[in-house]
């Protein structure tokens, strides 16, 4: 199918439902590392990376080669029917690299939401309990349990209920907006009094850095306290690393920034550099709680995606992408900090490694979110060819998800666009 962006937009509106909301009004033709081109030949610098999927860039030659090689052998046997070695060896690599000095097992799935669903299934099977505690602002996917766990109503939960029962939310720490670690922990204690006794809680699930919710890092004392609470009550701690994984935060997994370990961890997105693959890794005995046949899926652990994931792990090592994430993250943070005086809407610049975000609030206010200004920055950047994503409960945060393999000159070009756009937007506020 070919056509101009305008033709395609009309056809898209006629052929696909509005529920699949689409941010851009141009259509991708090709992409390479941190750049993509639309069907009319216009170039964009891609600081969205397919929503945190292409930490290793678009079409990394090693990933393309790995997929091509696998294409010559087989594309699908259904791992649960005829298994293949590459699934097993990838599980071995993940078990070795995931945080936690204990025997581990890994199961592969297809999407992030599916990994989350399965982590909850495993936690329930292992504990014989039903309750799950999640956090406001958290995002865990668009399946029924994913939505139930997600702590943001619009647009994810609108008109889709009822959701699976026994899911409870506590506020996630957010120092800028006055929610402390103590507040969050008190809210969990309150849940134990008002809603569910701790011995019926199977798991607490959290993102080490909330992604969709606004790139809020979980404070170290909060994660430590969650671990302690879980240990006291026999609750499992699940880290949802779907967005934080694979070098984005300067470590292979964000949990490696903390001095405690989770019992189960979900992963997806940059695991397979653009191919659909997700996984759950965890303590071996917990992972074995589900009965044979209880986990899996027709496409779960697709061989092409598994081949890509092997290449991704090699690339992260060979190109030292954890270090590069830290370097690039430091550069963008320093750059943005220099603008604080002339862009009074900048309320916060945060995030570990290259999981960096900038939050905008109304100047002179007590941190009143400014989604209009945020949207303006995003729109102006896009006009100049820089693709940026907005996030946050109040849509007032811009998150940077550039490929960690981005070329220096492309990164510099993006920083310079960002600077111009921020200065311009501050001079003529929305
Ligand atoms: C932390 C987290 N969990 C789960 C999901 C759901 O992943 P998917 O969209 O692949 O189902 C996402 C997606 O953004 C996510 O960021």
Image (tube, rainbow, N blue to C red):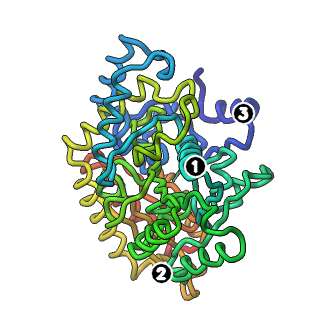
Judged left or right of residue 69, residue 401 is right
Q: Distance of mark 1 from mark 2, alpha carbons?
A: 43 Å
- N-terminal-most mark, 3 or 1: 3
Q: Distance of mark 2 from mark 3, alpha carbons?
A: 41 Å
Categorize mark 1 by other alpha carbons within 10 Å: few (<14), some (14-19), many (20+).
many
Relative to 287, residue 214 above or below: below
- Between label 1 and label 2, give the one nearer the viewer: 1
Say which residue appears at 32% left-offset and 17% top-offset. Answer: 69
- Give the SS element for disc 2: loop
Quadrant of the drawing holding the N terminus? top right
Judged left or right of residue 228, residue 65 is left
Residue 402: image location, x then y, percent: 38, 51
Q: What residue did someone put label 2 on? A: 344
Categorize mark 3 by other alpha carbons within 10 Å: few (<14), some (14-19), many (20+).
few
Categorize mark 2 by other alpha carbons within 10 Å: few (<14), some (14-19), many (20+).
some
- Give the SS element for disc 1: helix
Total of numbered circles in the picture? 3
Q: What residue did someone put label 3 on? A: 16
- Between label 3 and label 1, give the one nearer the viewer: 1
- N-terminal-most mark, 1 or 2: 1
Relative to 372, residue 163 above or below: above
Judged left or right of residue 314, residue 207 is right
Residue 128: image location, x then y, percent: 60, 51
Q: Is residue 390 visible?
A: no
Q: What residue did someone put label 1 on? A: 120
* Towards the viewer: 226 or 415: 226
């Amino acid at each position: 199918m070919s056509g101009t962006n305008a033709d395609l937009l009309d056809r898209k509106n006629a052929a696909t439902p509005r529920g699949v909301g689409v941010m851009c009004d141009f259509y991708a033709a090709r992409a390479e590392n941190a750049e993509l081109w639309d069907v009319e030949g216009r170039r964009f610098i891609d600081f969205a990376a397919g929503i945190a999927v292409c930490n290793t860039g678009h079409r990394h030659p090693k990933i393309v080669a790995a997929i091509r090689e696998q294409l010559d052998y087989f594309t699908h046997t259904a791992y649960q029917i005829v298994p293949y070695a590459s699934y097993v060896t990838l599980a071995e690599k993940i078990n070795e690299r995931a945080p936690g000095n204990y025997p581990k097992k890994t199961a592969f799935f297809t999407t992030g939401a599916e990994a989350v669903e399965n982590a909850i299934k495993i936690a329930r099977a292992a504990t014989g309990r039903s309750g799950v505690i999640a956090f406001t602002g958290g995002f865990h996917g668009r399946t029924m349990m994913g939505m139930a766990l997600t702590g943001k109503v619009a647009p994810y939960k609108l008109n889709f209920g009822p959701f699976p029962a026994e899911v409870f939310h506590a506020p996630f720490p957010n120092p800028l907006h006055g929610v402390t670690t103590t507040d969050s922990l008190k809210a969990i204690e309150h849940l134990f009094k008002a809603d569910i006794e701790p011995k019926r809680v199977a798991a607490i699930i959290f993102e080490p850095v909330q992604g969709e919710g606004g790139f809020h890092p979980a404070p170290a004392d909060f994660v430590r306290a969650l671990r302690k609470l879980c240990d006291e009550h026999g609750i499992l701690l699940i880290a949802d690393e779907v967005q934080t994984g694979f070098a984005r935060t300067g470590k292979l997994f964000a949990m490696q920034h903390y001095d405690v370990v989770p019992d189960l961890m979900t992963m997806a997105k940059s695991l397979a550099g653009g191919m659909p693959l997700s996984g759950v890794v965890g303590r071996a005995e917990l992972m074995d709680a589900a009965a044979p046949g209880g986990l899996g899926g027709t496409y779960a652990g697709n061989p092409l995606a598994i081949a890509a994931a092997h290449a991704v792990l090699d690339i992260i090592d060979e190109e030292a992408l954890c270090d590069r994430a830290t370097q690039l993250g430091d550069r963008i943070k320093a750059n943005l900090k220099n603008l604080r005086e002339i862009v009074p809407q900048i309320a916060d610049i945060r995030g570990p490694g290259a999981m960096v975000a900038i939050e905008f609030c109304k100047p002179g206010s007590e941190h009143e979110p400014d989604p209009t200004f945020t949207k303006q920055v995003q729109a102006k950047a896009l006009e100049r060819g820089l693709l940026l994503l907005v996030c946050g409960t109040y849509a007032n945060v811009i998150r940077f998800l550039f490929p960690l393999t981005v070329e220096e000159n492309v990164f510099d070009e993006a920083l310079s666009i960002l600077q111009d756009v921020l200065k311009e937007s501050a001079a003529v506020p929305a």
